Image (cartoon, rainbow, N blue to C red):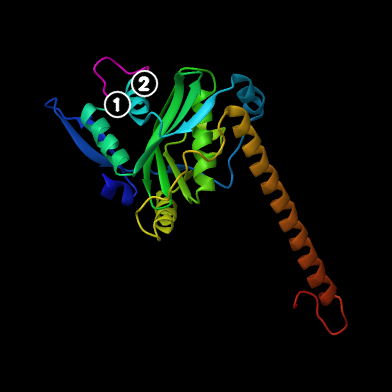
């Protein structure tokens, strides 16, 4: 499974014509990522998330998150999204430090979560579940903020949906995705650590952390625009000096 992820693919347990399951590797083109430098916080979430008072954790209930993702509603009778042996494989990856979960709690009840696989400074989100309003978005955003703080360079979500697009998820050509994956693996396959006790502890802190990131991004963009304008002005000034032909500077 780690080799599959290293190659930019992901495993799924599929049923053959004879009714037996087999684990196969799949790729997606385009491939969806959440750019950790371009995370979005929709206006409605900025308003509603603090009201929920959700508690956010990391790796506190990995097995339960996997089980809840396997019970995803809307599946047809007999359809299996996450088979027991594939779930067991993810639990093994978790024990080895290559898989983690991000949980959302309302009081003592687990109301949302997402889990995925980590290699180097690349992390994929395999699946997400929620049983309360905005809990799924809170799980994905909590993962994004914490992974960015830990120095991750790539957050793969495999396929873009209308829901994740609101958070900044975008499609990349597979070739571009593979280039970015290899860049994130330059330092080796050992996952960069994500602190359990670091990052926002509740949905109000999550919104505050996102607001700071977005504000800093805006300041950087304005600063860069100022530098570019100043550079353009200097070039234009030199081109108007005697002895400088226009367009040759």
- Magenta segment main secondary structure: loop
Which is more N-terminal, label 2 or label 1?
Answer: 2
Decide whether residue 130 is among the magenta residues.
no
For image coordinates 82% across by 67% down, the residue present is 233
Q: Give the residues drawn in magenta, as a range.
A: 73-80
Residue furthest toward the right? 242
- Helix, strand or loop for disc 1: loop
Residue at which label 1 appears? 81
Decide whether residue 79 is among the magenta residues.
yes
Q: Using the rendered view, name the quadrant where residue 167 is placed.
A: top right
Q: Position of residue 82 (x, y in %)?
A: 28, 28
Residue furthest toward the top? 77
- Would you call the spot at circle 2 few (<14 residues within 10 Å), some (14-19), or many (20 or more)? some
For image coordinates 29% across by 36% down, the residue present is 90
**Residue 159, above or below 163:** below
Residue at which label 2 appears? 72
- Helix, strand or loop for disc 2: loop
The answer to whether residue 35 shows anywhere in this view is no
Residue furthest toward the left? 18
């Amino acid at each position: 499974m780690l080799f599959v992820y290293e190659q930019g693919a992901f495993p799924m347990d599929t049923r053959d014509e004879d009714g037996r399951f087999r684990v196969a590797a799949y790729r997606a083109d385009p491939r969806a990522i959440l750019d950790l430098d371009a995370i979005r916080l929709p206006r409605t979430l900025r308003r509603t998330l603090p009201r929920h008072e959700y508690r956010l954790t990391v790796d506190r209930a990995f097995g339960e998150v996997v089980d809840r993702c396997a019970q995803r509603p809307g599946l047809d009778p007999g359809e299996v999204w996450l088979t027991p042996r594939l779930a067991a494989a993810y639990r093994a990856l978790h024990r080895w430090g290559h898989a983690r979960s991000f949980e959302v709690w309302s009081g003592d009840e687990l109301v949302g979560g997402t889990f995925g696989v980590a290699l180097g400074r690349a992390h994929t989100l395999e699946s997400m579940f929620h049983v309360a309003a905005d809990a799924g978005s809170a799980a994905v955003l909590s993962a994004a903020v914490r992974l960015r703080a830990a120095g991750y360079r790539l957050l793969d979500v495999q396929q873009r949906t209308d829901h994740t697009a609101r958070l900044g998820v975008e499609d990349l050509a597979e070739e571009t995705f593979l280039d970015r994956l290899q860049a994130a693996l330059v330092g080796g396959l050992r996952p960069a650590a994500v602190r359990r006790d670091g990052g926002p502890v509740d949905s109000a802190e999550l919104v505050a952390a996102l607001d700071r990131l977005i504000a800093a991004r805006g300041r950087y963009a304005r600063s860069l625009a100022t530098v570019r304008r100043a550079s353009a002005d200097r070039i234009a000034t030199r081109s108007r000096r005697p002895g400088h032909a226009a367009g040759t500077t």
